[in-house]
Amino acid sequence: MAGSTPGTPFSPWLAASEIVGRIANAVVAIVAISAFGLPSPLDVLIIMLAFWVTIAVHEAGHAVMALAVGHRLFEIRIGVGPTLRFHLGRTRMLLGPVPGLGYVVSLSDDARGYRMNRLIVGMAGMAMNALVLGWLFLHGITTGLTTSLAVFNGLAFVSSFLPVVTKTSMGPLRTDGLMVLRTLVATPTDLDEERASFHSVQAQLLVEAGDPDAARAELGSGLEHHPGSPSLRGWMGYHLIQAHRYREARELFSSLADPADDQGRTVEPHVRAAYLNNLSWADLMTGDEDLLDEAETASARALELLPENPSIMGTRGFALICNGSYLEGVFLAEKAYAKHRIPKDRAASAAIVSIGRAMNWRFSDAERWLATARESDADCPLLERASQELERRRSEPNPAWDLEGTWSSDHGRVAESG
């Protein structure tokens, strides 16, 4: 599998496509076992070795041709399971003992012959499998290993045409057939956007290396060459949010959140949902009450597009809380907390719940959720805000108490005295 445009949110269609890919890999294994009969332990070892070598040969074809046309190799993965990680020059290598997955992430920002170069890189893996298969037939298939290699190289060649997209740390990657087809039909604007993603991946690696300032500089450099790139502007907005530069981020996401971008390209629903969600989050994090209506509208539209996304649930809950709908907002934030698995995301959701509970004068609950947020991520940017909200509410009179001190319901209605 060759690299395509990273940095794109993983849509429901792409998630379904990845499931298809997993099923296809299982079918390959079943076909291989059926071809060889009930395998012995030695046969299993030979089959796994042949499968692993087949993937390695395929990915080597992509890697060699990428270097030949001047593209940068960002990452090569072969196999899954306990992974050996190391760098070969500037290329990150990921090697796993269990066959079944392989990909190469390679990109370039050189416009000269870009379409043809991408076609060459995309077809190189299939070409290597075809060459190995041809060599085996010419020289004879006489052993278990050569039989396994012939079967797997044939299956690898055919499976390259499946409409499968795999999620990786650098974004979704298409199979060779999809990549070649997409490259053939791509407009100049599409190819410009793909070249722009070169800078997105560079920035991602700089963040992983602990240099967010250099990552923003890399994105800025990319925007100088591709000022209309929605992916670069989206990534820049994301990094501005991470740097707590919320007003600058808001300006970027406000221009990205329309159904079509400023060059007339239609924005896919899942991508638009991400832009709307980030717009709402930037609005809320400014603390500017004049932006609450925009945050409310943007978060509602994002949730309509991706109703089960936990990040969007959390932002929507925060917007509802800031606009006075405490119970509904807390419910969504708690649901987001339950869905999240990354500590910093769980911390943000817990802090939002704490803010909602504090604003509804539920102080013990607010303290408990604040402690949960702090345990999950001591650097969560909402911790101070949640703590301040708790102290502020404690110093204010509670309208949910009547003159005789009777507590009202959760809805905040003032209880009537008898």
Image: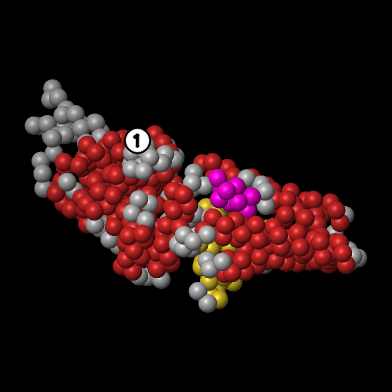
Q: Residue furthest top?
A: 418
Can residue 334 be seen at all in this image of the molecule?
A: no
Give residue 100's position: percent from left, percent from top: 68, 58
Q: How many marks?
A: 1
- Residue 243 % position (x, y): 27, 61
User: Does the magenta segment cover residue 182?
Assistant: yes
Front residue of 340/89: it is 89
Left or right: 156 as drawn, with respect to 303: right
Residue 32 vs residue 328: left or right?
Answer: right
Q: For the residue labelled by badge 1, is the local secondary structure a helix, a strand or a loop?
A: helix
| Residue shown at the point (41%, 36%) measured from the top left | 305
Identify the image quadrant of the N terminus. bottom right
Boundaries of the magenta span: 175-185
Q: Quick check: 405 left or right of 38? A: left
In what quadrant of the picture does the C terminus appear?
A: top left
* Residue 363, above or below 139: above
According to the picture, the residue beneath numbered tag 1 turns out to be 301
